Every structure is written in C-alpha cells, then in structure tokens.
Image (spheres, rainbow, N blue to C red):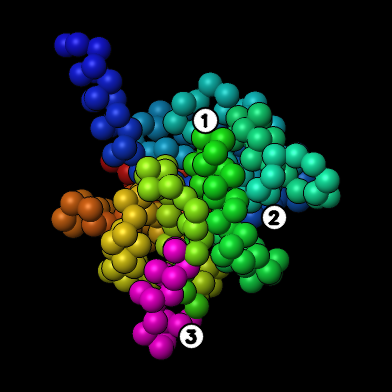
Amino acid sequence: MSGGAIQLIKVSQSTMKKLIIANWKCNPATLKEAQKMFLALRGGLKNNSKAEAVVCPPFVYLAEAAKVFKNQSSVKIGAQNCFWEEKGAFTGEISPKMLKSLGVKYVILGHSERVMIMGETNEMTARKVNAVLKLGLTPIVCIGETAEERKQGKTSIILEKELKESLQGVAKNQMTKIVLAYEPLWAIGTGKACSVDEAVKAANVLRRTRKAPILYGGSVHSQNAAGYIAARLDSARQAGLDGLLIGGASLDPKEFLAIIKQIR
Ligand code: PGA
C-alpha cells in the first residue's frame, strides 16, 4: 500500500470519531481537585480509540491538563472562551495565541452562559471564531434557541440567524474547520434534555448551509447519551450527530467515562 493510501485511511477513521467534550464551566474550586479529576480521566481514557475526548477546564487549570494528558493522543485540551486579539492592553483577557502555546486545540465560543450572563453578542463570537481559526485551533460554536422561541415555532429561523451572525467573516474553505454545537438554552443545566429526534432535526438545519460536524449539548448524562451517539448510525448520511458537549455530567469523571464507553 502506498503512503498516500495509508494517509487516506487514517483521515477517514479520524473523521468518524465522535467528539465528546467535557465543559467544566467554573469548576472545580481548587487546583487540587482539578488535578484529581484529570488523573481519574487519564486512566479511563487510555484505550479510547472511538472517541476524541476534549477536556475544557477553566483557563487556570489548562497548563496542568496539558501536562497530565501530554502523551494521550485521544484526549485533547480545550478552552471555554478566549479574546480575539493576540496580545495587548486588554485587562483580564486570554488570547488564542496564549491558549495555543499551552497545547490547547479546541475553544468553545458563543456559549449561552457567555451570552446571557456576560452579555456577549454574536458579533463578538464571530470575531473570536475568526481569531481562533487564524491560529489553526478548532472553534466549537454554540447555537441554540430559548424556550420561548421554541414555543413560538421559531427554532429554525433563530438557528439560521445565529449561525450566520456568529460565523460572519469566516471564509468558505474554513467552514469545515469549525465544530457546531446545538445547545438549546432550555435544555442546558435543566435536566430537560432535548429528544434525539428534535436534536437531529436542529442539526440538519445547521447542516443545511454549513458542512461542519454537529454536536448536541444540554442535560446529557450516561443514561441518555447513547441515543444521541447512535443517531448517526440510524440515519441517512449527513444526518445525525457527531458528538456531545457535556456540562454537569462531565464533572464526575466516572460519569464522563461511562459516556465515552458507550461509543463503539
Ligand atoms: P449541561 O451543560 O450538560 O450541564 O446541561 C451543557 C453545556 O452548557 O454545554
């Protein structure tokens, strides 16, 4: 077999991998606890070949995460946010270049908690997405409707609008380097997960215009994860979900590993 053919097989295998993201949000409260969690994950993720696990702790624990997972190719480090400039007089901000220098590969952007609590706009998300892409990191862009918008039957319109605004200025050939996460606001941290059918439907709305891997996030845990993960297998090509973005349940390493184990 030629080198080219080997390369091709490797690529197609890696694109089949499910992306399972642990979004720790503002947890845990101490470095000591974070170290314990990293170590609990390290052992459990050792022989993980079907999933790409991405651990996104708070910024201050990233260097420690990079150290712990240094030799584990199936575990990547992600950040939960970043600024759009490289460096300068921007008190309190963290740049994509700083993240890259720590070994970070993914950056979650436009999360609804940044929008609802910190007042971030889609325009700010777009600036961040462009800055992250420029450095060769992968943005995970969160898109989702509120309970009210859903009730009014506006989900598709909202998703399309948010997507357009959050990806403003991104060149067409960069679109495949973005991961999209469908995160309905009413399902985040509420225990009311979106049904698999509804999540797949939303994913297909997002996929209509952008060829990007699509994740689902919102109250995922080890008892409901399998349904979302299997969705791709049950559906036609280009349908289904490519992975999960997990908040609360990812704070328990055992629970997170139980989700990863379900990927065959
Ligand atoms: P949750 O959070 O799993 O706790 O609902 C998901 C997210 O906010 O990404």
Residue at point 30%, 29% (across, down):
11
Magenta stretch bounds: 147-164
Q: Is residue 118 magenta?
A: no
Q: Are there few (<14), some (14-19), or many (20+) residues within 10 Å of tag 2?
A: few
Residue at point 36%, 85% (across, down):
153
Question: To which quarter of the image does residue 62 belong?
Answer: top right
Q: Nearer the viewer, residue 122 or 24?
A: 122
Q: Nearer the viewer, residue 26 or 82?
A: 82
Q: Is residue 151 magenta?
A: yes
Residue 200 in sight in this render: no
Q: Which residue is mark 3?
A: 148
Three-letter amino acid code of the residue under disc 1: Gly
Three-letter amino acid code of the residue under disc 2: Cys
Name the mark on residue 26: 2
Question: To which quarter of the image does residue 181 belong?
Answer: bottom left
Q: Are marks 3 and 2 in contact (CB under 8 Å)?
A: no
- Percent position of residue 207, x then y: 31, 58
CA gap, disc 3 to disc 1? 43 Å
- Percent position of residue 144, x then y: 46, 69
- Percent position of residue 176, x then y: 37, 44
Residue 138 located left or right of residue 207: right
| Count of numbered labels shown in the rendering | 3
Q: Are there few (<14), some (14-19), or many (20+) residues within 10 Å of tag 1?
A: few
Residue at point 51%, 72% (across, down):
185
In the structure shown, which secondary structural element does the residue marked by tag 2 occupy? loop
Q: Which residue is mark 1?
A: 43
Residue 218 located left or right of residue 51: right
